[in-house]
Each structure stands twice: as structure tokens, then as C-alpha cells.
Amino acid sequence: MTGSSMRLERASGADVPAVEALLSAADLPLDGAADAVASLGVVARDAAGAVVGAAALERFGSAGLLRSVVVAPAARGLGVGRAVVEEAERLAAAEGMDDLYLITETAEAWFPRLGWTPVPRSVAQAAVGESIEFTTVCRDKGVPMRRLRP
Ligand SMILES: CC(C)(COP(=O)(O)OP(=O)(O)OC[C@H]1O[C@@H](n2cnc3c(N)ncnc32)[C@H](O)[C@@H]1OP(=O)(O)O)[C@@H](O)C(=O)NCCC(=O)NCCS
């Protein structure tokens, strides 16, 4: 797949099964993923229309949690991950979320390349601490990060 054959779109409920399959295969949390993908998700599709990447947001007032960032194994290393994260950031801005956070156990070395930086857990907790990720799956683990404005 080349960059030109990939297209980015707002996700719909119909994309949830495909995204959940990618998340499961990558061992990422499914709790709350369906709602986030269907309401504030983006997907990358290949030329045949198959979902090869995804990212989603959860809103907490003017803050947002970026979650469910995943790329199909066969499509990794081609810029799909960067593309879905940047598309989700544009969606967040369009939706009035000006302070973005995430928590990751697997990609803390990758997100800084996209402008994210680690923050103390207390900082993220104050903004998006009510999220399922902070209250359950990543309650005691994972690296909280924040998107710094360029
Ligand atoms: C992390 C992930 C989304 C990156 O997607 P991608 O499409 O491969 O990313 P890009 O093509 O935009 O970037 C690829 C570059 O990032 C690096 N990279 C990819 N994943 C990385 C990781 N977890 N940690 C550090 N570097 C990583 C690659 O080595 C590559 O480096 P290069 O450009 O120097 O060759 C993808 O690997 C994935 O789905 N991983 C499993 C799920 C996951 O960990 N999601 C994040 C949860 S918060």
C-alpha cells in the first residue's frame, strides 16, 4: 500500500467490528472502544476499502483522550499510524478539544515523534481521569502523554 492508495475517513458504527478486530490482535483494550470509534473515530482504508488503521477520541469537557490507535500489521511502517493520529488531532480541534492526552503501554517511544510528550499521571488524571482507560485497564500502568501545541 502506498500513501496515495490510503484514504482517511471519519469512522462510523459499521467500522466498529473491523477496528475491534485490529485492537484485539494488537492486545489493546476493547472497553469503551466501540462507542469512541463510532462517535469520534477516524479510520484509514486501503484501496479496496478495508480498514487498515484507526484512532478515536473520548471527550472530557474541553479535553480529549486519544485512544485505540492501531494499524494492521501488514500496513505498519508506511505512515498510516501518523496519518490517523494527525486526522484524530484535526477532529479534536474541530470538535473544540484543545487539550489532548493519551496513555500508552506500547508506544511511548513513538508518540514523541508526533509531538506528544510524557506528563505526570496527576496532570492527565485531572483532565481525563474519568476515562475507562484511566480508571480500569491503565489505572496503575502505562505512560500518560499530552499533545503539546506546535
Ligand atoms: C504504533 C503503531 C500505531 C504505529 O503505526 P505505523 O503505521 O507503523 O506508524 P508510522 O508508519 O506512522 O511510523 C513508523 C515508524 O515508527 C516506528 N514505530 C512504530 N511503532 C513503534 C513503537 N511502538 N515504538 C517506537 N517506534 C515505533 C517504526 O519503527 C517506524 O520508524 P521509522 O520511520 O524510523 O522506520 C503500530 O505499530 C501499531 O498499531 N502498534 C500496535 C498497537 C499500539 O501499540 N498502538 C498504540 C497504543 S496507545
Image (cartoon, rainbow, N blue to C red):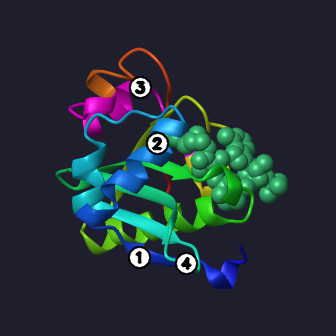
Which residue has dot 4 on it?
A: 48
Left or right of 59 in this view: 29: right
Q: Which residues are magenta?
A: 117-133
Residue at the image point whose x is 59% and y is 77% from the top? 6
Q: Residues within 10 Å of mark 1 (few under 14, many from 20)?
A: some
Quadrant of the snapshot with the N terminus: bottom right
Which dot, 2 or 4, sits closer to the camera?
A: 4
Residue 62 is at least partly visible in this image: yes
Residue at the image point whose x is 46% and y is 27% from the top? 120
Residue at the image point whose x is 27% and y is 38% from the top? 128
Residue 19's x, y, as percent?
Answer: 41, 53
Residue 114's x, y, as percent?
Answer: 62, 57
Between the C-alphas of marks 2 and 4, the distance is 20 Å
User: Which numbered disc, 4 or 3, marks the residue that appears first in the sequence?
Assistant: 4
User: Which numbered disc, 3 or 2, marks the residue that appears first in the sequence?
Assistant: 2
Residue 67 is at least partly visible in this image: no
Between the C-alphas of marks 4 and 3, the distance is 41 Å
Establish if 124 lies above or below 135. Answer: below
In the image, what residue type sits under mark 4?
Ala
- Label at residue 99: none
Which dot, 4 or 1, sits closer to the camera?
A: 4
